[in-house]
Image (spheres, rainbow, N blue to C red):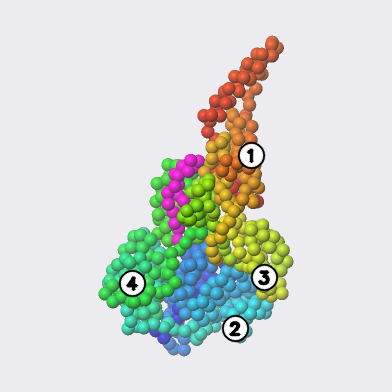
Amino acid sequence: MKNIRNFCIIAHIDHGKSTLADRLLQETKTVSERDLKAQVLDDMDLERERGITIKSHAIQMKHVYEGVEYTLNLIDTPGHVDFSYEVSRSIAACEGALLIVDAAQGIQAQTISNLYLALDHELEIIPILNKMDLPGAMPEEVKDQIEELILCDRDDIIPASGKTGLGVTEILKAIIDRVPSPKGEPKAPLKALIFDSVFNSFRGIIAYYKVIDGSIQKGDHVKFINTGKEYHADEIGILKLSQEPADEIKTGNVGYIISGIKEAKEVKVGDTITKVDNPTQTAVLGFEDVKPMVFAGIYPVDTEDFEELREAMGKLQLNDASLVFEPESSAALGFGFRCGFLGMLHMEIIQERLEREFGMTVITTVPNVSYHAYNKRGEQNIVNNPTDLPQGSNLDYVEEPYINAQIITAGDYVGAVMGLCMEKRGQLKNQVYLTTSRVELTFEMPMAEVVFDFYDKLKSISRGYASFDYHPIEYRQSELIKLDILLNAKPVDALSAIIHRDKAYEYGKKICLKLKELIPKQQFEIAIQAGIGSKIVARETIKAMRKDVTAKCYGGDITRKRKLLEKQKKGKKRMRQVGNVEIPQSAFMAVLKIND
């Protein structure tokens, strides 16, 4: 055990985490030169294109230092805020963390939030200044920021470059010298923490775990404490670039278990594995079910593809247990699914994976969050879909989720960022100057205002210099109403939204104008209305395409023309009663960009 080191890497998106991990694998000869490619651990095409880690990875390295062979387990973590629960479980499986900061960009919001997670778990932090080879690197300024943030010695900060390989041997030395070896009882009953799971189409679900106490042998009869399910360990082993079977995984080490599990719901990140015949008395603390924050409807463009979409969603859920979905139907879009996501990036990635991996083109409805609606008797209803909001006198009040938002930006953009947050109903709680030119702003704001287009707007007003991170705090009572969009007096459920009363008129007006542009003209007049209950707050009219029926009347009495016009009027009226308005797919997409 004293030769094992478990560590993770904490960094903001695009600070060079995956590249530095490549250098560590190369230096320890874990990956042969032939297999080496950029971002070895990011095996999804989407990850490589976007340059972000979506699925966390784990890999074991062997390194000889001063004649002793050490086992180094790198438990990689995704950097994005949407995957913060996965990050917290990976951190719980480690004793140390490499804090990577880009020498050109300095400390960003997500670095700070993940660092606090690591400090809560009392991890040994090794600060690393990456991308030292860049011409725009500001090593002295960024070292000052790191010193202030973690109160470390300036000499402890390791200058490095993932591209050139600078500082890699110093990092390995620091991991061995400074990260403590795992503490655990080899003689105690088995207690192992699941920090990740992957789906293999031949073997089922493979769970990754760290053994905290005891050891696990091949063929053991094991139990997952939180789900209460029992399995046989058909195969266990260690995690190299590919999985290597072993007969036993001992205390402090990291491994995988294959036991023929077919359901993604049965393996939960943060669960505890123990033996059935000699169970541990205490589970690992901190387990929670992943709660989706953003909800949206996903519908196939062609209604006949519904079964195919169901199959694709099921397969995606095996790979990503944090995706939640249930069937629903809409009058405008037919059959589809109501899906719960961890955040907007998660939603975007699921949509893209559906298109790439399964060839499914889908329509996504307006994203919204989960509300709590209370009736006069004090009973709570959870509302994930605007159509579920109770109407009329039965509804007492509605609560919406609030978040604590941290924004780090350059001093020049503070005014613009504050203006944006105030517009989104945010309340400024704190303002701290990290350095003379960098400010950390803390706001409390409704989650519903963030899921739409907040991040894009923040990036554009700060010219890409603002970084954003949030975590949910509580539900608070708000003046929320359901805004319906009606076409010829028929509500279109896929376009309805739950919105703050003060913004209802403005939002309704914008949607009506947008739909007027996008819905093609028909032979009859179309009324587009936005309404709250029975009260209409905005209206636009698409005029009918009118055929000139009087063209053939030249001369004669005026009554001849009037007769033809009356006949046309009756036809239009009948057409309006039976006519259907087709809403183009671009209309649903346009609602997402309504504020641009």
Q: Is residue 70 magenta?
A: no
Q: Residue at x 64, y 50 (%)?
A: 503
Which residue, given by chain and number where applicable, does mark 4 sit on?
Answer: 236
**Dot 2 lies on which element?**
loop
Residues packed near mark 3 inside 10 Å, few (<14), some (14 to 19) or many (20 plus):
some
Tag 3 near tag 2, CB within 8 Å: no
Dot 1 lies on which element? strand
Q: Secondary structure at mark 4?
A: strand
Crowding near the residue tagged with mark 4, few <14, some 14–19, many ≥20 C-alpha atoms within 10 Å: many
Viewer-proximal residue among 388 and 408:
388
Whichever of callouts 3 and 2 sits on the residue coming sooner in the sequence is 2
Name the residue that disc number 2 marks.
Answer: 152
Q: Which residue is mark 1?
A: 539
Q: Amino acid at mark 1?
A: Arg
Closest to the observer: 21 or 550?
550
Percent position of residue 452, x then y: 59, 55
Task: Write down the region rendered in magenta.
Answer: 322-339
